[in-house]
Image: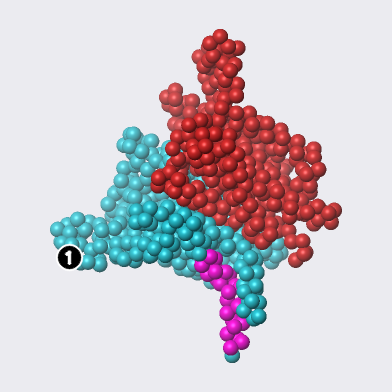
Amino acid sequence: MKLDKEALRIKFLQGSWGILLISNLLGFLIGAVILLLAGFNPLEAYWVILKGIFSRPKYVSYVIIYATPLIITGLSVAFALRTGLFNIGAEGQYIVGAIMAAAAGYFFQLPLILHVPLAIGLAIIAGAIWGGLAGYIKARFGVHEVISTIMLNWIALYLSNFVITLKAFAAQGTGKTFPIQATARINLLSEWRITEAGIEFIRSHKVLGDILKTPINAGFIFAILLAILVWYVLNKTTLGYELRAVGFNPHAAEAGGINVKKSMVTSMLFAGGLAGAAGAFQVLGVSHRIAKLATMEGYGFDGIAVSLIGNNTGAGSVFAGLLFGALKYGGSKIQDAMQAPTEVINIMIGTIILFVAMPKLIRLILTLLERRAKN
Amino acid sequence: MEAFIKDIGFIIGTTLMYSTPLMFTSLGAVITERSGVVNIGLEGMMFFGAFVGAAVAYYTQSPWLGFFCAALGGALLALIHAIACVSFAAEQIVSGIAMNFLGSGAALFLSRLFFDGATQTLTIPNKIPLPLAFLFGDGKLFKSAGFMDLIFNRFATVYLAFLLVAVVWFVLYKTKVGMRIQAVGEHPEAADTLGISVYRIRYGAVMMSGFFAGMGGAAMSIAVVSRFSNTLISGHGFIALAAMIFGKWKPQGAMLACLLFGGAKGLEIFLGAKGFPVPSSLLAMLPYILTIVVLVGIVGKTTPPAAIGKIFDKSGK
């Protein structure tokens, strides 16, 4: 019995989830070493981060708000990756989604029940076109999706900076568009919050009142639903089976009668739509407008990290997105609290991804440890 | 007429200035990809190099020492990529993504430590020199702010970049090392049977790519501008990568592609300065659209190194 448990434990650690767990531990360990070398107490820093995440309901709410777009761009990258495509373009698909949501949110005058779905729907379509384009030119012309999506990211960024110069859409010289209509917002109780009753409620209710101080919105619920959708499509439908088969071995899939080229386009359409939705929720729930982009905001690139740390699955992306959001939000607090550079978080994330990329190294370390334990 | 000629000179000059950081990095991309290793971490290596260059140039007051240390910094980061990809069979794109997080993270972390919590360095005292400055000015060979001045009175890094294009071309096509790099990138198993150490060549090539990307970053932070900031390198490494593919994995092709991207930037700055009614963001978009169009057109006539991205394991597993 004991032996079975032992075997099971080794099997888990050598498997992909085990490698993720070990990679995360190594990431935190190396983050601690770097803080130590820079003259900071790592335990104190991690404690500040933990407090910065959990010590107030407001903080938890912010973590969720931070995590929402990352979860969805993570899903986007994960979806494409399961078909063997590297969607570096989630960034651009996110941007065109945000543009579309801001435009639909501002220009249309509709009741909420129609306005929100319309804005989200148009953003998804825009993102899907942006992603699908990369899939199409890969399928049709063999242009690697990594290169085409990098180009499409920049085109999206400049497109965004172009639309904010349009008179109908933005006040001249402000560098940002007009805010979206109240009917397009997905914030919770945003109207009620500024009524007298709302203000009184926020003042008297410690937990809920604290949460309502943040731009809490329905985006997170949508993110969870999308994660379930991704899991369902990939694991429970014929389409998902075909897409995964292509990712696993395109030649075998082709021989098995699956249209590999069509799968590439479908996968990128889907991935693009997801990233577009991420942009929509951010506009409808948090920013309510788009502003001039001096540089890439990084939602798409962070989504790559989320996908990889989440083992490229739906549920994994939710956890990794929350982890990433928590580290980003909580990590920003060590700067003020102890003047420790918050970028140690980026180094930790980078380290985790690096180890995720090297399962061979981790298996080697495990084998060595095993051998040592036996002697 | 004279004003027009001057405008042309201005555009060419700014093109050269903005092309060169890309050119260094793109040459690095050529070297590593020809050896069969993808490095999309060049962005992070450029980012790190830009910081190291500016920080060392600030503290030592020597831009050249800064430039050299930036290259070493890039190479150091590339060493991690090489260890992961060559020795531990890592997924190369995933490792590259990790490099981008590590490079930007390390640069900003160190920046905050050495520059009082700021994500930018202070202004460096001495930029990279203008080696031909003695030719221009009153009573010199060419008058200042003239056509020749605008084009040729450029930072030493500009000349160095073009020189390195020739050097990389020569090494890649005319020397034994270059032949080995190509062999390893095309058919590592065959190269191995001929007694070429695939691992050693790839380690060298990946580290050279980081060395070049580091120089590219520094060419930005201590020549084009005179400090590092957290938005200075934003996507330049990715553009350099695209330029390498646009240039069909050849140093001279990469150079031309970088000139195209730099040219669009030069034109954008020129039209912005002149207040032309063309929206600068639409103009800025052009080279990216053009890249896609050209890639769609040329694929089929060009192929990447055959063993690109494939893991080589000497034990034959």
Vertical placement of B261 versus A276: above or below?
A: above
How far from the left and from the top, in percent, is residue A261? 64, 56
Give chain B's shade.
Answer: red
Residue at figure coordinates x 54%, y 34% from the top left: B62
B141 or A5, nearer to the observer: B141
Residue A280, image x, y percentages: 40, 53
State the residue in front, A303 or B110: B110
Quadrant of the image occupied by residue B155: top right
Residue under label 1, please give it.
A204
Front position in the image: B141 or B174: B141
* Residue at x 52% of width, y 53% of height: B101
For residue A180, say whether it is visible: yes
**Count of all numbered marks drawn on residues in the image:** 1
Q: Is residue B113 left or right of residue B314?
A: left
Quadrant for the C terminus of chain A, please.
Answer: bottom right
Q: Residues within 10 Å of mark 1 (few under 14, many from 20)?
A: few
| Quadrant of the rendering where the N terminus of chain A is positioned | bottom right
Q: Chain of mark 1?
A: A
> Which residue, as the protein is rendered here, is positioned at the far bottom?
A1
Residue A268 figure quarter: bottom right
Task: Write down the region rendered in magenta.
Answer: A2-26
Residue visible at 22% across and 66% down in the picture: A206
Residue B164: x, y in percent? Answer: 68, 34
Residue B121 in picture, x, y percent from top left: 45, 40
Residue A9, magenta (yes or no):
yes
Residue sitting at x 28%, y 53%? A183
Chain A is which colour?
cyan
Amino acid type at circle 1 is Ser
Characterize the magenta stretch by its predominant secondary structure. helix
Q: Is residue A16 magenta?
A: yes
Up-down: is A332 above or below A258? Answer: above
